[in-house]
Image (spheres, helix red, strand yellow):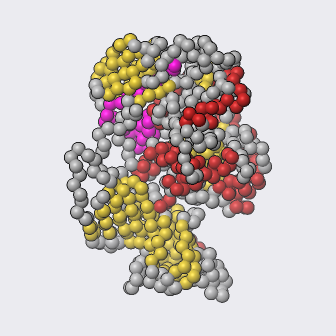
Amino acid sequence: MALLVVTLTAGPGLVTATTPAAAATPTGQEAAPTDQTVTVKAVEDTYVSQAGPTKPHGSHTWLSANAATSDGATDTERRSYVRFTLKDLPEDASDVKLTLELQSVRTTDTVLEVRPVTGTWSENTLNWNNQPTAGDVLATAKGLVSGQTVKLDVSSAFTGNGDYSFAITSPSNIQSVLHSSQATSGEGPKLTVTYGKAGPAVPAGPLPFDLPSISKLRTSSHKVFAHYFTPYPVSLNNRAGADDYYTKNYLNPAGESGKHAAYGGLLRDRPLPREELSGDWLLADMKKEVQIAAKAGLDGFTVDVLSINPANAHWNRIKTLIKAAEAVDPGFKIVLMPDMTALNTDARTLASAMATLATSKSVHRLSDNRLVISPFKAEQQSAAWWKDFMGIMKSSHGINVALVPVFLNFSSNASAFAPISYGFSNWGNRSPAQQGGIESNISKAHSLNKIWMQPVSIQDERPNQSIFDEANNTENLRTTWEKSISGDADWIQLTTWNDFSEGTQFVPSVHNGGAYLDISSYYLTWLKTGKAPAIVRDTLYLTHRSQFVAARPTSGSQSKFMNPRGGTSTPRDKVEVLSFLTKSATVKASIGGKEQSYEAKAGIQAQLFPLAYGLNKASVGAVTVSSPWEVKRSFSVQDLQYNAASSGRR
């Protein structure tokens, strides 16, 4: 691949570029991605001294950092501050790595720490007394050698073009001295950005639009998370699909010694099966999930904390998920969501557990370094209890909390929780008939000066609870997204990423193939960019059940059946063709073998057909979608989920 190195100087600068001869790209093939590097010098740098609390040091030729007790003196802590400006990075930059480069004046066995800085400052006026807030440590380096450059990875701070400020601190009792941008010899601070830049857009893919770069999507203040449920990772026992725990024990009515037989098995869908893996297979699986979610445009996962017992599998899965995010994508964040229906604990014990997880850079914090805690069914404990929890987090662990409670009853709890909360959310509903309050909830949260995290859902079926919601094919998904956008929700929580026991999964699965996540990529791009993405390739989505709602199994031993939840939309038997078209066109559909056609408009259109026995498919021009799920008269288990297929995926 070609390598382009661009170096930008800090003043009226010279820009130099060196490009090795690029290999020719065969006709008809996509050009390989290119690695590119941009280096910028500090636009401002200085240090502050506890010994001289009102004195600025912007004109000094050196920077300094040490602990409060240093070189035998007390109350002499020093911290340095540097700021860089990144501009002209392309929107499609990927795999971004940020490296802070500092050159030492002295040889010292000291430790340097780099922290993100919020707030404004100027090297001409900055002093100890007015220094801005510094966040948690991004990177450390130990041992400085005179004239040598220390490189610190600060990639987790990357948000796109703009200003980047860092504080350089030290826990060491010996003073570290670094060259500043005013130095007459040596090199001042630099920030190097290395990134990949994709070649020409691929003319086909699973999405009907061109997804902006992840770096561009993440510059938006609107955030999209998916609720991660630890009971259902990709694999439970690292076996191939036909022999794994899902197949033998959760989908099989006789599984787990027949404990799920009455309702036809615990689950109706499962994660996409895979072959047996070697090594740390759980970490490998979770890395893959992070990659899938990030590629779809998600900002992170809200992880359901079901246990804080270190010996519990759910706790260890949370720690592994955080580790996976650290390894795969520093910008992909994990929001801690203590599940108050499962945790029977006191505020101090919960605070200790949350502080343990919060040591990771991948656990989500706001720009002011507050740790986001978003408890599920927060009203299980009183607002006073949560205030106590937040106080313990601060006094015992040095962590300020931004509380975003998820309520089962928002209206009854908003007033009590408002004084202690950064934002609000509710768990929401999974049926179009129950989505009328979305915009009023958002408005109420905003009137209280809180952000709102809106739940977006597909459907819901719970065999073990004998209940389901009528989603009307993709109508519930589209409705929750559209109302979130029109109401200007601040954050989104996809409910859920992988709770297969409720049938609410967005993760690519056997029965949805990634279609619901693809549709959500379109809407999240709309939310984040402020406009509906242009449709550049015709794409069809096909959704339907594999049995009629009122039908009952013709064989097997199931005796408990799902019934519609009160207040849900009226159950229906329909096949939906959801089209994303570049222009109006004739769509052909074969529903249960019956050939039909209709004129579809440009843009998005949902067309309904009566459910019929047999197979379903649809096409527009050369674009075809075929559902592998036959609608059957005879079956052994009740299954009311909407299966999904996409013309963009095979």
Residue 35: quarter of image:
bottom left
In the image, 594 versus 57, the foreground residue is 594
Vertical side of 428 occupied by 25: above or below: below
Vertical side of 472 occupied by 10: above or below: below
Residue 520 among those drawn in magenta: yes
Q: Is residue 628 left or right of residue 580?
A: right
Q: Which residues are magenta?
A: 518-546
Where's residue 366, x and y in %? 56, 54
Where's residue 356, x and y in %? 68, 57
The residue at the point 38 percent across, 33 percent down is: 648
In the image, 200 versus 63, the foreground residue is 200
The residue at the point 42 percent across, 58 percent down is: 96
Residue 386 among those drawn in magenta: no
**Which residue in the rendered view is the most extreme toward the bottom?**
72
In the image, 500 versus 279, the foreground residue is 279
The residue at the point 69 percent across, 34 percent down is: 412
In the image, 11 versus 34, the foreground residue is 34
The answer, for residue 188, to whether it is visible in the render is: yes
Where's residue 468, x and y in %? 62, 23
The answer, for residue 465, to whether it is visible in the render is: no
Vertical side of 597 occupied by 447: above or below: below
